Amino acid sequence: MGSTSGESMQGSEGREERIVVSVRVRPLNDKELAKNDVSEWECSNDTTIIYRSNVPASDRSLYPTAYSFDRVFRTDCPTHKVYEEAAKEVALSVLSGINSSIFAYGQTSSGKTYTMSGITEYAVTDIFNHIENHKEREYVLKFSALEIYNESVRDLLSTDTTPLRLLDDPERGTVVEKLTEETVLDLNHFEELISFCETQRQIGETSLNEASSRSHQILRLTIESSACESMVNGKSSSLAASVNFVDLAGSERASQTNSAGTRLKEGCHINRSLLTLGTVIRKLRLASKGCIQYFLLV
């Protein structure tokens, strides 16, 4: 799982950004337990996981077995703890006018959608609790949702499946043309919108997952706020920022998923876009001054 916020790391355009990488290890599911499978990953501490390699002893020196991250969560760790320790600060930074993104990345059937659904729910609940406790500011929440399926962008708040165009805006950067944006009334309204999005998303069965997400999903919550006192005095004291909750489709190997036809085509598009995303993230991490080809992601 990755998260980014507009602070801490100096970017190539003078903006400060920070990238945090956390790992959540999924417990074995019922099918795996029935086959007496054993987990190949072991959490040695809160920042390191160890891979129990099946390669011959003579070749093990060629493969690293220990990997370090900002945070590692064990198989018995509840989603709420993952949210509190890895995502909460990033998600709630939107209330301070800081743009941020939280996304789940990993192999198909690794629990990304399960984790992101929980994190999104906890984050939005905390946001509404914050609004309730800060009556001195006026808040407007706007929500949009899209999926990237076979390199086409679709609006998840619309029943129209026509692909949407990406446009370059000189002020806002890349925007999605005609993407629906709903004003969120309350927490119940947000949950209704999320439920509708779930019915629209592309889901398919593979040999590794009976309900595999075949698209990348991006949920965006934009929060605009202004001090009530400034509205009366005519002085400007407003904030505006967005938080993105991104559930990426899982990386996969055709040999493992036994994919063919449509599923194979989906897998090729998924893997190619994830490869490009990895390239973009590495360049951001290194604060690269070169051209970052965001458009290749779709």
Image (spheres, rainbow, N blue to C red):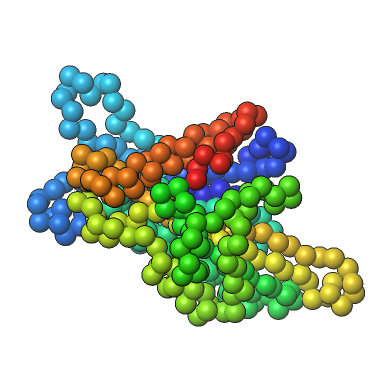
The structure residue drawn at horizontal position 24% and vertical position 57%, both measured from the top left corner, is 205
List the single residue furthest toward the front: 162
In the image, taking residue 213 as reference, residue 140 lies left or right, namely right
**Residue 123 picture location, percent across and down:** 51, 65
**Residue 84 picture location, percent across and down:** 48, 60
In the image, taking residue 86 as reference, residue 34 lies left or right, namely left
**Residue 55 picture location, percent across and down:** 18, 28
Relative height, residue 194 to residue 110 (above, below) = below
In the image, taking residue 124 as reference, residue 82 lies left or right, namely left
Q: Nearer the viewer, residue 87 or 208?
A: 208
Residue 273 visible within the image: yes
The structure residue drawn at horizontal position 19% and vertical position 51%, both measured from the top left corner, is 207
List the single residue furthest toward the left: 35
The structure residue drawn at horizontal position 63% and vertical position 28%, both measured from the top left corner, is 290
Q: Nearer the viewer, residue 98 or 220?
A: 220
Residue 26 visible within the image: no
How many numbered discs, if any?
0
The structure residue drawn at horizontal position 78% and vertical position 71%, both measured from the top left corner, is 227
**Residue 145 picture location, percent across and down:** 52, 63
Relative height, residue 25 to residue 254 (above, below) = below
Q: Nearer the viewer, residue 182 or 298?
A: 298
In the image, taking residue 173 as reference, residue 81 lies left or right, namely left
Q: Nearer the viewer, residue 42 or 212?
A: 212
Relative height, residue 18 to residue 243 (above, below) = above
Name which quarter of the figure residue 113 lies in. Answer: bottom left
